[in-house]
Image (cartoon, rainbow, N blue to C red):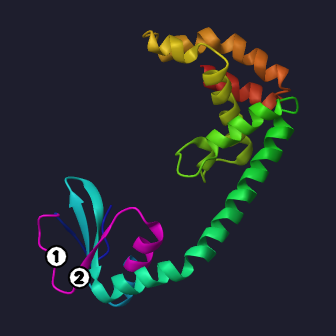
């Protein structure tokens, strides 16, 4: 990916320029605002890479301290907004599970939602590109595969993934039907199985 003109990649061994501070990778709010304000100030932003891994950025100190202050001031409102978004996402997912799997036990539904939609999990429920019905179907299928079949045991014994999927497919299909799976789920399950 090409960097904007005012961004330069440096090694962590290169001394920090005078008047600059290092912001480690990990806080999206601080990184976004430091980057934007540095560009607006028409200053050089240094992307610090160790090997091919970005470990942080170097930005002018005045911008660094300004963003640190802004982050502290807005923390509670950002957390509240995040909780609202998270609650909305979980409620939508819950409604979708109930619609697609009307007979799923509540304890199973809650386990699916907790795992697949946990923030920063990298799981299907967090994908912004996948429509909610597909997210829910994939999450329920994964839950059944890992919690209600011998799939993981088979993999641990060295069984190939495709063979393990075939071995557990009938049991999974039975549970999907028991939970009232819709036709769309059956089609998705057939895709998954192949």
Tag 2 secondary structure: strand
**Few, some or many residues within 10 Å of mark 1 (<14, 14–19, 20+):** some
Quick check: 152 above or below 105? above
Quick check: 147 above or below 6? above
Identify the residue shown where x is 25% and y is 78%: 21
Q: Quadrant of residue 134?
A: top right
User: Which one is nearer the viewer's eye here, 174 or 22?
Assistant: 22
Tag 1 secondary structure: loop
Q: CA distance from mark 1 to mark 2?
A: 6 Å
Q: Quadrant of residue 143?
A: top right
Task: Identify the image quadrant of the N terminus.
Answer: bottom left
**Label placed on residue 172:** none
Q: Are marks 1 and 2 in contact (CB under 8 Å)?
A: yes
Q: List x then y, in percent, for residue 175.
A: 77, 19
Please name the residue that numbered disc 1 is placed on: 16
Quick check: 47 above or below 127? below
Please name the residue that numbered disc 2 is placed on: 20
User: Which one is nearer the viewer's eye here, 87 or 37?
Assistant: 87
Please state if 145 lies on the left or on the right of 175 as rendered: left
Q: Is residue 20 magenta?
A: yes
Q: Which residues are magenta?
A: 12-34
Identify the residue shown where x is 46% and y is 10%: 159
Q: Is residue 110 magenta?
A: no
Identify the residue shown where x is 30% and y is 69%: 3
Task: Identify the image quadrant of the C terminus.
Answer: top right
- Looking at the image, how many numbered discs can be counted on the residues? 2
Identify the residue shown where x is 17% and y is 64%: 12
Q: List x then y, in percent, for residue 89.
A: 71, 55
Q: Quadrant of residue 83?
A: bottom right
Q: List x then y, in percent, for residue 110.
A: 74, 39
Q: List x then y, in percent, for residue 52.
A: 24, 53
**Few, some or many residues within 10 Å of mark 2 (<14, 14–19, 20+):** some
């Amino acid at each position: 990916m090409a960097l904007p003109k005012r961004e330069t990649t440096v090694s962590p061994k290169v001394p920090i320029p005078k008047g600059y501070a290092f912001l480690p990778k990990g806080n999206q709010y601080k990184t976004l605002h430091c980057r934007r304000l540095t560009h607006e100030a028409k200053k050089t932003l240094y992307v610090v890479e160790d090997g091919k891994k970005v470990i942080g950025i170097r930005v002018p100190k005045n911008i660094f301290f300004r963003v640190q202050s802004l982050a502290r001031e807005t923390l509670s409102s950002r957390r509240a907004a995040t909780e609202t978004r998270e609650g909305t996402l979980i409620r939508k997912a819950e409604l979708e599970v109930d619609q697609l799997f009307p007979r799923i036990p509540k304890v199973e539904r809650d386990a699916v939602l907790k795992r697949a939609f946990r923030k920063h999990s990298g799981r299907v429920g967090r994908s912004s590109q996948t429509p909610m019905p597909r997210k829910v179907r994939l999450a329920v299928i994964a839950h059944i595969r890992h919690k209600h079949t011998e799939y993981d045991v088979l993999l641990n014994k060295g069984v190939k993934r495709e063979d393990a999927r075939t071995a557990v497919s009938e049991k999974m299909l039975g549970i999907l039907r028991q939970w009232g799976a819709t036709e769309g789920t059956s089609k998705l399950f057939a895709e998954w199985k192949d």
